[in-house]
Amino acid sequence: MEWLGLHFMTGLPEGGQVILDCTHNPFLVLLAYLVACATGFATLGMTERVAHVEKPASQRLWRWVGAGCLAGGIWAMHFISMLAFQAPIDIHYHLPTTLLSLLFALTASWLAMHTLSHPQLNFWQYLRAAVWIGLGIATMHYMGMAALRSNAMAYYQPVLFVLSIVIAIGASLAALLISSHLRDGAGVFHQLLKYTASLVLGAGIVSMHFTGMAAFSLVLPAGSLEPLPSDNNHLQLGLTVAVMTLLIIGSGISAAWADKKLQHKEHDLQRVNALLSQLDQARMSLQQVAHYDPLTNLINRRGFNQIFAEKLIEKTNEGGMLAVMFLDIDHFKRINDSLGHDAGDELLKVLASHIKAAVRSHEDVVARFGGDEFCILISLYDREEARQMAQRIMLKMKEPIELSGRRMVMTTSIGISLFPEDGKTCEELLKNADLALYQSKDCGRNALHFFSSNLKTRATLELQLEEELRHALRENTGLMLYYQPIYDLRTGQVTKLEALIRWQHPVHGLLTPDRFIAIAEANGLIAELDNWVLLKACEDLGELSRHDCEELKIAVNCSPLNLAREELADEIEHALHAFGVAPHRLELEVTENALMGNITNTLVLLRQIRALGVSLSIDDFGTGYSSLAYLRRLPLNTLKIDRSFIQDIPKATQDMEIVQAIIVMAHTLHLQVVTEGVETFEQYDFLARHGCDFVQGYLLSRPVPLAELRPVLAEINQRKHMHTVNPLSLARGITALTSTDPFPGTPAPHGGASVVRPIR
C-alpha cells in the first residue's frame, strides 16, 4: 500500500539498502515534549473557557482559539520532532505538503473543541469523537512524513503503524475525558490536576509521534551510493518554531486567563448589581411595610405624617387651606365580637374602598391609623368644601355591605380640623380633629363636627381634672361621701342611706359625680374610686353604729366597668372585715345596662357577692334594656325606679300606669321597690297607695355629709306616721335643718337621684 510516496503495508525491497544509523536530537525531543505539554495545558484552559463563557459568540471565539492552539501545538511538536530526526542522508521537506498537514491538525483540533463544548456527553459519544480526532492527528502526522524529501524511500511496519493510530485515538479519548472532568473547579488542587493532565496528554501526543517514527524506515534504492554522514543541523530552526509556538500558546493561555478574570469581575459586578437590586427591593419593601397598611393598602400613620408635614410646608409657603378628617367606624367592635376578626378585616377592606371612592383620587390622602380609625387630608378653598366631602363619605359608608351571609349598614363619626385656623402643626391639627371626633361620638355617633376652641378648653379641663383626681385618690384629700335618706313606707323610718360621692375641688368648689365619673372611667381610675367609696361607706357605717344607728344600711353605687372585675367580691369582703360591718348592712347598686352587658360573667360575680351576705339592687330601672328572663335569674333584693317615671306624676297617666306595673312585677319577683326623685306630696301619696316599699328624694332630704346626717334622721324618724301627717310640714322641718344648700344654684325640682347622680 502506497500513499504520497509512503509504503505502509509492503515489505522492504530485497535489493535496497536500509539506513540503520538514524538518530534523534535529545534536546529537540525534549523540546517537542515541552511543546506537547504546553499544548495540553492550553487545550484544558480553552475547554474551561468554552464551558464557562455565557455568550454564544464568545463560545465560538474560544472554540477557534482553542482549536488554533491545539492544532499549532500538535503540528509544532510534530515538526520539531521531525527536525530532531537525524539521518546520514540529505533530507528536506516539501512546504505545501507540510502546510497541508497543518490543515489536517486544525480540522482535528476544531472537532475536539466542538466536542468539548457540549455540556453533557456519554462515553460512546466521547469515543466516537476520539476516533475521528485520532484519525485526524494520524493523518496530520503521516501527511507531515510525506513532506519528507530524500533519495531514500519511506517504508512503515504495519504493526507499529496501526499502533500509532491507536495511540492517537487513545490520547484523544484521554484528552476529551480529562477535559470534561477538569472544566469545572478551582483552587490549588485543581491546578495540580491540570498540570498533571497536561503532562499525560503531552506524553500521549509524543508517544503517538515516536511510535509512528519507530514504524518508519528509510531504504536507499539498489545501486545508490553509500549514504554519507549528514551535516544537517536543525537545532536553530527547532528552537525558533518552539519559541514561536510557545509564545502563541502562552498568549492564548494569557488571553484565557485574562478573560476568566474579566468574566469573574463581570460576575462580581452582576452580583453587586443583583445585591443592589435586592437592597432596592428590600428598601422598597421596608418602605411599603413602614408607610403602608398591609390590610387595606392605605398609607399608615407614619406615611401620613410624612405627607402631612410636606403639605403643611407647601401651604405655609404658598398659602391655602387643609382639612384633617378623623373617621371612626361606629360600633365596629360588635362586628369583631359577633362575626370574628376575619370578618372585621374584610369589612375594613370594603370600608376603605368606600372612603377612597368618596374622595378625590389624586388630591386627597387617605390613611388608616389602626383598628377602625381612618384619617383623610384634603386641600380646599373654604370650610363648606370639607363639610360636603364629609357628608359624601358618610353617605357612601351607608351603602349596604354583604358580609358572612349578612347584609349590614355601617355608619361613621367624623371630626374635622382646619389649617391654619385650628392649628399650624401636624400634632396640633391631628389632636384637634380627634377632639372633634369625640364630640361626634358624644352626640350619638353618625355625625360630623368641626373643631372649636370650646372642645380644646374642655379637653384641657378634663386633663387637669384627671391629674387632680389621681392626686386626690393618692393623697386621700378632697373626696367625701354625702348621704341621702331612703324612707321605709311600711315602718315610717329611714332604714337606708345612699352614699353619693362628692369632690371638694380647691378651685372649682364642690363637684358632683357627673363632673368627674366619666373622667375616672375613661382613664382607668374608676376601680380605685369605687373602692375608695366602698371603704369610706363601711367606715361611716362603723361610725353610725357607735351612735345608735346599728340597723341602718348603706347603698353604694357600682360602675359598670368595675362590675366586670373579678376582684370586686374580694374587695367588698375586705372592706367589711376591715371595719367590722355586718354584710347585710351593705347594699350594692348596679345599673340596668351594666347587668345586661355580659350576663354570664355578671351572674357569677353577683352570686359571689350575694354569698357574702351583701344585698344587691338594680338602679335606674326602666331606662335600659332589661330582659325579664334574665332579671328573674339575677340574685337581686331591690329594684329602684328611675326618677324619670316619677317627675310628671300625677299629670302623666301613662307614667303612673308604668310605675304601677313595675311595682307589681317587682313584687312578683320578690323584689323590694325603691322610688327615687320623690319631690311632691302627690308623688309620695301615689307611691304609698300602690305598694311602693321605699321612697327617696328632696321631699325628705337633700344628700348631706355624715356630720349633718343624725339631726336629719332624727327629724324624719320622729314622724312615724307620715301617711297620716302632711309630709309638706316634714319637708319644711328638714329644710330648716339643712338650710345650707350643698349645691348652690341647683333648683329644688332637680333633686333626688337626678341631681346627685350615683357612681356609674
Image (spheres, rainbow, N blue to C red):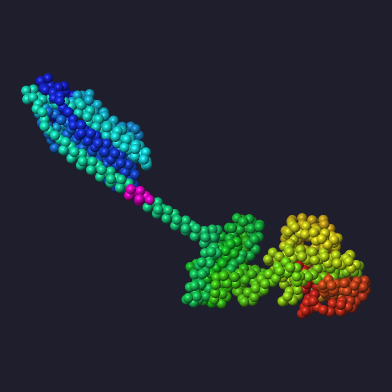
Query: Would you say the magenta stretch is mainly helix, strand or loop?
Result: helix
For residue 549: magenta? Answer: no
Q: Is residue 120 visible?
A: no
Tell me if residue 381 comes above or below residue 498 in the rendering.
below
Q: Residue at x 73, y 59 (%)?
A: 565
Q: Is residue 493 left or right of residue 117?
A: right
Quarter occupied by the C terminus: bottom right
Residue 121 in the image: state x and y as whole percent: 34, 36
Q: Is residue 448 left or right of residue 108?
A: right
Q: Is residue 317 left or right of residue 629?
A: left
Determine which quarter of the picture holds residue 669: bottom right
**Extreme residue toward the front, this view:** 27
Magenta part of the chain: 261-268
Q: How many marks?
A: 0
Residue 298 in the image: state x and y as whole percent: 53, 62
Residue 364 in the image: state x and y as whole percent: 51, 69
Viewer-side residue, 523 vs 55: 523
Residue 131 in the image: state x and y as whole percent: 27, 32
Q: Is residue 627 visible?
A: yes
Determine which quarter of the picture holds residue 324: bottom right
Tell me if residue 223 comes above or below residue 559 in the rendering.
above
Q: Residue at x 92, y 73 (%)?
A: 719
Determine which quarter of the picture holds residue 522: bottom right
Q: Residue at x 44, y 57 (%)?
A: 280
Quarter occupied by the N terminus: top left
Q: Residue at x 59, y 70 (%)?
A: 431
Viewer-side residue, 364 vs 455: 455
Q: Is residue 10 left or right of residue 589?
A: left
For residue 267: magenta? Answer: yes
Viewer-side residue, 410 vs 472: 472
Viewer-side residue, 572 vs 226: 226
